[in-house]
Image (tube, rainbow, N blue to C red):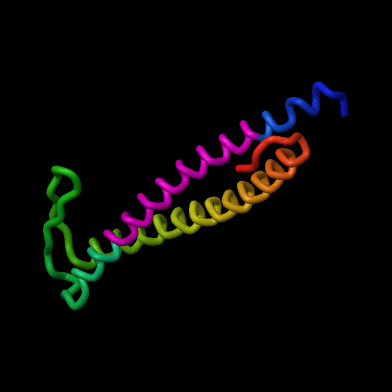
Amino acid sequence: MSSGQEATLPEDLGRHLERLRRTKRELVEEVKLLHKRVLKIENCLELLEGRTDDLPCTFCRGLVYQQSTVRALREGLSASLAVNGDLYSEAHGRLMSLHEQIRLAEGASNQNNRRFGAPEG
C-alpha cells in the first residue's frame, strides 16, 4: 500500500462509520414508529374483543368518519397488524445487522488508530 493510501484509510473508515451511524439513527426512528403503530393496532383490536361481529361501528381515520361492522374493522386491523408487524421485524433485523457492522467498523478504526498513533474512540 502506498503512503497516500495509508493516509486516507482512517479518513475513509471514519466517513464510513459516520454513514453507518446516520443510517442507524434513521433506522431507530423507523423501528420506534413501527413499534408505536403495532401497539396502537393491538390496542384497537383489544377494544373490539368480545363484541358481536355484525355490530355496526363508526371509526375515524384522520378527519374522516366511516361506518362499518366490527368484523370488517377487526379484519382490516388484523391485516394492518400483519403488514406492520412484518415491517417492524424487517427494520429491527436491519438495525441489529447495522449494530454488528458498526461494532466491526469501530474495531477496525481502533486498530487503525493504534497503528497510526491517533487516540482511540
Instruction: Name the side, left or right, on which 19 lies relative to 117.
Output: left
Q: Quadrant of the C terminus?
A: top right
Q: Quadrant of residue 93?
A: bottom right
- 84 left or right of 23 in image: left
- Name the residue at the top extreme: 4
Q: Position of residue 61 (x, y in %)?
A: 19, 48
Tell me: 78 left or right of 116.
left
Where's residue 40, x and y in %?
27, 59
Task: Please tell me which residue lies in front, 55 or 85.
Answer: 85
Quadrant where the image shows the N terminus = top right
Please name the residue shown 33% across and 63% down the image.
78
**Residue drawn at the location 36% of the way across and 60% of the way down:** 81
Q: Nearer the viewer, residue 74 or 45?
A: 45
Q: Position of residue 119 (x, y in %)?
A: 65, 38
**Residue farthest toward the bottom in the current orientation of the protein:** 50
Q: Looking at this rendering, what residue extends furthest in the right direction?
A: 1
Q: In the rendering, at what x and y percent does residue 15 appear?
A: 62, 31
Q: Is residue 118 above or below residue 75?
A: above
Q: Which residues are magenta?
A: 14-40
**Looking at the image, which is closer to me, 4 or 26?**
4
Q: Look at 32% across and 55% down and name the residue there.
A: 37
In this view, 29 is above or below 14: below
* Most frequent secondary structure within the magenta stretch: helix
User: Is residue 65 shown left or right of residue 103?
Assistant: left
